[in-house]
Amino acid sequence: MSDTLNDLTDSKPNAASSVLDRAIAAATEALLARQRPDGHWVFELEADATIPAEYVLLRHYLGEPVDAALEAKIAVYLRRIQGAHGGWPLFRDGDLDVSATVKAYFALKMIGDSVDADHMRRAREALHARGGAERATKRQRQRLDDGEPECVIAFAAGVAVENTK
């Protein structure tokens, strides 16, 4: 352990600080064990649903040629990371995030997924149960209202309707 870490953990121990000290030491050892000889670390970087969904939405908005093979891979990824709650979280096994769910749903719809597909129905039900698309973040609602690349999405009668103004 580094001298700084030792200085932080060498104070008089009590039960709480001992548990914390052991957790810090274990985390430090785990990270150091994964460090490469030249000093760097390598970890998998995985985006939440918003990045690939926004990519699809932006390309469609800009009228760029559809890359069907890439969109098929994005659709598989979005379907795979859909939560048991029916929506999409901002991190693995997280709670449904309304804004992420709106984006993922609409991207899958633009890719060609049927609104009658089970995963799409579950997403709609999950959104409706949480108050609908109007519960998205203020920035997301502004984008929807302004017709930005995500387009305008209205959830009415259980069907997503898009309008690019």
Image: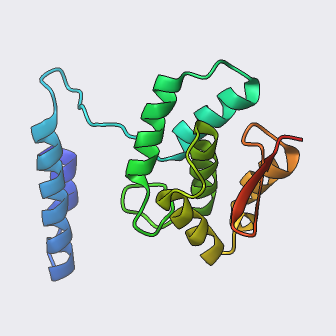
Question: In terms of depth relative to the viewer, which is nearer, 120 or 78?
Answer: 120
Residue occupying the point 70% across, 68% down:
135
State the residue lying farthest toward the bottom. Answer: 15
Q: Position of residue 95 (x, y in %)?
A: 46, 67
Q: Quadrant of the C terminus?
A: top right
Q: Is 145 positioned to the left or the right of 99 in the image?
A: right
Is any atom of residue 23 visible in this view? yes
Q: Is 88 positioned to the left or the right of 31 in the image?
A: right
Is any atom of residue 47 visible in this view? no
Q: Position of residue 57 (x, y in %)?
A: 66, 36
Residue occupying the point 12% across, 64% down:
22
Asked if 5 appears above or below 54 in the picture, the reply is below
Question: In terms of depth relative to the viewer, which is nearer, 17 or 72?
Answer: 72
State the residue lying farthest toward the right. Answer: 165
Q: Position of residue 124 (x, y in %)?
A: 60, 65
Asked if 84 appears above or below 113 in the picture, the reply is below
Q: Position of residue 106 (x, y in %)?
A: 64, 48
**In the rendered picture of this protein, how many numbered marks are placed on residues?**
0
Asked if 131 appears above or below 69 in the picture, the reply is below
Q: Is 123 positioned to the left or the right of 136 in the image?
A: left
Residue occupying the point 18% across, 43% down:
31
Residue 39: quarter of image: top left
Residue occupying the point 46% across, 24% down:
69
Question: In terms of depth relative to the viewer, which is nearer, 93 or 39?
Answer: 93
Question: In terms of depth relative to the viewer, which is nearer, 135 or 26?
Answer: 135
Asked if 97 appears above or below 126 in the picture, the reply is above
